[in-house]
């Protein structure tokens, strides 16, 4: 039969369609044009035909005969007398159950010949679309309903996924908090044991000194003893940290020498993790003995609080001798600079305007509940100098304060440091408490990244965060910063 051949069988037009032309209409094309695959669209078309026939769908007998022929071809394939069902030809609507005696009904199906079932489905959809304008809005409504169902299904999946992630996050946070509480409890128990051993060692000396200072006031004696015990503990811990650092440096030098000479470390050497163990020794069951603690206190701390220096401290200086070495600080950067600024700028105290040739100093006292200081800062448009120092003094409060000074003030301080021992100018008394450098002042590209860092408390004192703009002759800098401590 020719490609464009049309024949009339009992008044029914038979159009032979080439398989090659129908093969171009694949599933993706129907998906794009209709929003459904061919199989889904065919099912919708048959449903529409059954529901609307005789109502919204008014078809002639010839048109209905052609559509039903396509449904038979799509369902059973090519017409065959030996396997074709013996039911009424128009049974697609479920009403005609009698055997068909009209030859035209079977001839319309036979006329489709070897047409594939996929092509029959496609032709059924196209014919129904051309015959009934309501079919496309019908499919569009079902497509919208399908999309809405898919959207709800996706939202439900996202909700379940978020709930699972939130549950897992809370579980991890609870476990981390539990581990933190256990670690804090162990540290607190260790601190109490160290304090008990130190207090037992110095009880008689401190009591004698307090009685000499306040012979008529028992309350003042007890307060002075508590102050002396606290200073004694801080000095002891500073000495322990100093010994640990020195030991680490010695071990590191030994490792470097061994690597240079290609000699493997001996089994008796300690690892860095072992070197950082808490200063008091422990028994196998984890409990420390009073004798061991007393021995460590005796070997590290002399009876210093009774000498003239300690008396001078009690008279109001409030300074604590610093150790020779401090633990190094940890520093890092992160890229979310805009979100950091947005989170900080709502608090005016955390935004500082530093003029040209000026330096801002943020004083952060150590907190009795804290063990580590954290800082974060960023600037607008330009870099700024930054450094961290630790002032060994007892601050009367834990309030964070900010001072902005001109460069001349810093220069005067440097001149005083250089000339305080000049014989010709005479000796100048410097009442400033001792200060150690933790991070030297260097220019940081804080306009490109958020600069962050942390430092473990070396003892009681005040951190000095220096933001230096003294090198800038004309430009002022806007600083966004945040400081906090961890328990």
Image: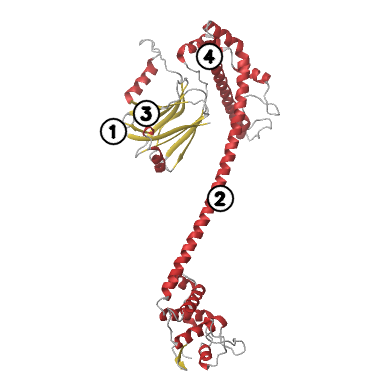
Q: Which residue has dot 2 on it?
A: 164
**Of callouts 1 and 4, which one flags the residue occurring earlier in the amino acid sequence?**
4
| Residue drawn at (55%, 93%) of the image | 101
Which of pointers 3 and 1 indicates the residue nearer the eye? 3
Distance from disc 4 to disc 2, alpha carbons, whole Å, reads: 54 Å
Label 4 with label 2: CB-CB less than 8 Å: no
Mark 1 falls on what kind of element? loop
Q: Earlier in the sequence, mark 3 or mark 1?
A: 3
Q: Earlier in the sequence, mark 2 or mark 3?
A: 2
Local SS, label 4 = helix
Q: Which mark is residue 223?
A: 4
Label 1: few (<14), some (14–19) or many (≥20) C-alpha neighbours in 10 Å: few
Q: CA distance from mark 3 to mark 1?
A: 16 Å
Percent of width and height locating residue 246: 57, 25
Residue occupied by mark 3: 360
Callouts 3 and 4 close, C-beta under 8 Å: no
Q: Would residue 185 be found to the left or right of residue 427 on screen?
A: right
Of badges 1 and 4, nearer the viewer stands 4
- Residue beneath the point at 54% across and 20% down: 234
Disc 3 or 4, which lies upstream in sequence?
Answer: 4
Within 10 Å of disc 3 (Cα), the crowding (few <14, some 14-19, many 20+) is many
Q: Is residue 357 above or below residue 308?
A: below
Nearest the camera: 245 or 61?
61
* Nearest to the observer: residue 417 or residue 333: 333
Q: Residue at x 41, y 42 (%)?
A: 337
């Amino acid at each position: 039969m020719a490609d464009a051949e049309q024949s009339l069988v009992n008044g029914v037009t038979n159009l032979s369609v080439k398989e090659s032309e129908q093969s171009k209409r694949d599933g993706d094309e129907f998906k794009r044009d209709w929003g459904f695959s061919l199989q889904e669209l065919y099912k919708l078309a048959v449903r529409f035909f059954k529901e609307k026939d005789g109502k919204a769908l008014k078809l002639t007998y010839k048109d209905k005969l052609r559509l039903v022929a396509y449904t038979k071809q799509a369902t059973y394939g090519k017409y065959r007398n030996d396997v074709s069902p013996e039911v009424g030809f128009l049974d697609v609507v479920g009403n005609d159950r009698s055997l068909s005696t009209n030859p035209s009904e079977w001839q319309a199906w036979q006329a489709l010949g070897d047409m594939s079932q996929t092509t029959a489905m496609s032709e059924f959809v196209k014919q129904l679309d051309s015959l009934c304008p309501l079919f496309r809005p019908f499919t569009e409504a079902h497509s919208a309903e399908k999309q809405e169902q898919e959207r709800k299904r996706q939202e439900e999946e996202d909700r379940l996924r978020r709930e699972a992630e939130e549950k897992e996050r809370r579980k991890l946070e609870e476990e981390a908090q539990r581990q933190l509480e256990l670690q804090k409890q162990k540290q607190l128990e260790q601190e109490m044991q160290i304090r008990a051993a130190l207090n037992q060692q110095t009880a008689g000396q401190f009591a004698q000194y307090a009685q000499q200072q306040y012979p008529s006031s028992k309350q003042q004696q007890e307060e002075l003893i508590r102050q002396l015990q606290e200073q004694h503990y801080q000095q002891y811990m500073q000495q322990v940290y100093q010994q640990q650092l020195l030991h680490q440096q010695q071990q590191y030098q030994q490792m470097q020498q061994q690597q240079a000479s290609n000699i493997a470390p001996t089994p008796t050497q300690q690892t860095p993790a072992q070197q950082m163990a808490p200063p008091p020794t422990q028994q196998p069951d984890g409990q420390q003995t009073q004798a061991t603690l007393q021995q460590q206190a005796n070997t590290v701390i002399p009876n210093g609080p009774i000498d003239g220096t300690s008396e001078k401290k009690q008279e109001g200086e409030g300074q604590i001798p610093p150790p020779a070495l401090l633990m190094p600080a940890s520093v890092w950067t992160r890229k979310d600079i805009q979100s950091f600024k947005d989170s900080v700028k709502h608090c005016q105290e955390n935004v500082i305007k530093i003029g040209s040739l000026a330096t801002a100093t943020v004083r952060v006292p150590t907190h009795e509940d804290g063990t580590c200081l954290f800082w974060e800062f960023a600037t607008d448009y330009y870099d700024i100098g930054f450094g961290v120092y630790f002032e060994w003094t007892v601050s009367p409060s834990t309030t964070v304060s900010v001072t902005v000074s001109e460069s001349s003030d810093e220069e005067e301080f440097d001149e005083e440091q250089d000339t305080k021992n000049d014989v010709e100018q005479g000796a100048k008394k410097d009442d400033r408490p001792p200060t150690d450098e933790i991070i030297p002042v260097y220019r940081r590209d804080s306009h490109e990244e958020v600069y962050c860092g942390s430092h473990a408390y070396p003892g009681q004192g005040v951190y000095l965060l220096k933001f230096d703009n003294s090198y800038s002759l004309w430009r002022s800098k806007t600083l966004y910063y945040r400081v906090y401590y961890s328990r």
